Amino acid sequence: MLEIKNLHKYFGDLEVLKGIDLEVYEGEVISIIGGSGSGKSTMLRCINGLEKRNKGDIIFNGKNVKHGQKEFIKLRERIGMVFQHFYLFPHKKIIDNITLGPRVVQNVSKVESNEQALKLLEKVGLEDKAEVYPAMLSGGQKQRVAIARALAMKPDIMLFDEPTSALDPELVGEVLQVIQTLAKEGMTMLIVTHEMGFAREVSDRVIFVNEGQIAEMGTPEEIFENPQDENLKRFIQSIY
């Protein structure tokens, strides 16, 4: 579904991504782990066009798309993204936060978008929150709304950028449960996470990013039980 070839990203003189190569298959769940500043989030932001890559190719469903092209704009509609913070519109009700994208970008009718939004709220366990405002929700509930909002665009692939890092510990589980449900349903996902137990349980593959490069990639068992890269060994030892 997605192929990344020789992806480079600079911020001024600082090279943050140093030639990322990755193939993502339909229905696959890949967790991306690594220390702060290793380039994990920047990689996701380059994939969906929030950051303009300096070099490299992004091939989506067989099409090599370039930043700024019409095809790239269409591509972004097929890629859902959930951030560390929720970025909900505080002055809009929950149902309006979810329906805004489909109505404005995809010209979906109000009736159809509302029906879809209610189904998605039920999916994330918030069917009774459609008419409230974000300020009335907990952090975990806001993040579940953010997931529903991304799903409302009917993406082919979902990108999660540390979706639980801004949450209190007792709220993490409810968000991870929603993501786990999506994995069971076959949603293709790239997940930047610090939740190692979750990465181990839900992933088909785990990627360890270090200093802007994929230092090691393998099954959860290979990564967590038999790491080969010395930096990965130290990273895992620092966590457990």
Image (cartoon, rainbow, N blue to C red):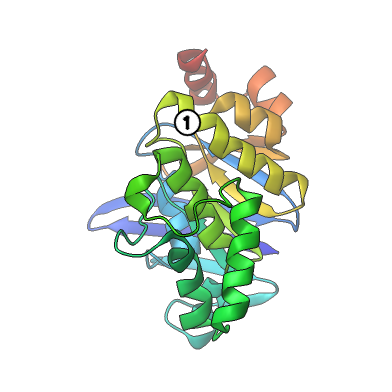
At a point 37% along the width and 55% down the height, the residue shown is: 133
Q: Is residue 226 visible?
A: no
Q: Is residue 189 left or right of residue 12?
A: right
Q: Is residue 221 left or right of residue 80?
A: right
> x and y percent of residue 185 in the render?
77, 50
> x and y percent of residue 201 in the render?
69, 29
Amino acid type shown at disc 1: Leu
Q: Is residue 1 visible?
A: yes
Q: Secondary structure at mark 1?
A: helix
122 and 224: which is toward the camera: 122
At a point 53% along the width and 19% down the height, the residue shown is: 236
Q: Quadrant of residue 200?
A: top right
> x and y percent of residue 83 in the render?
42, 50
Q: Which residue is mark 1?
A: 171
> x and y percent of residue 35 in the render?
41, 31
Q: Is residue 112 left or right of residue 165?
A: right
Where, quadrant-wise, is the N terminus in this rendering?
Answer: bottom right
228 and 123: which is toward the camera: 123
For the residue carrying disc 1, how many other residues have a C-alpha within 10 Å: few (<14), some (14-19), or many (20+)? some
Q: Quadrant of residue 177?
A: top right
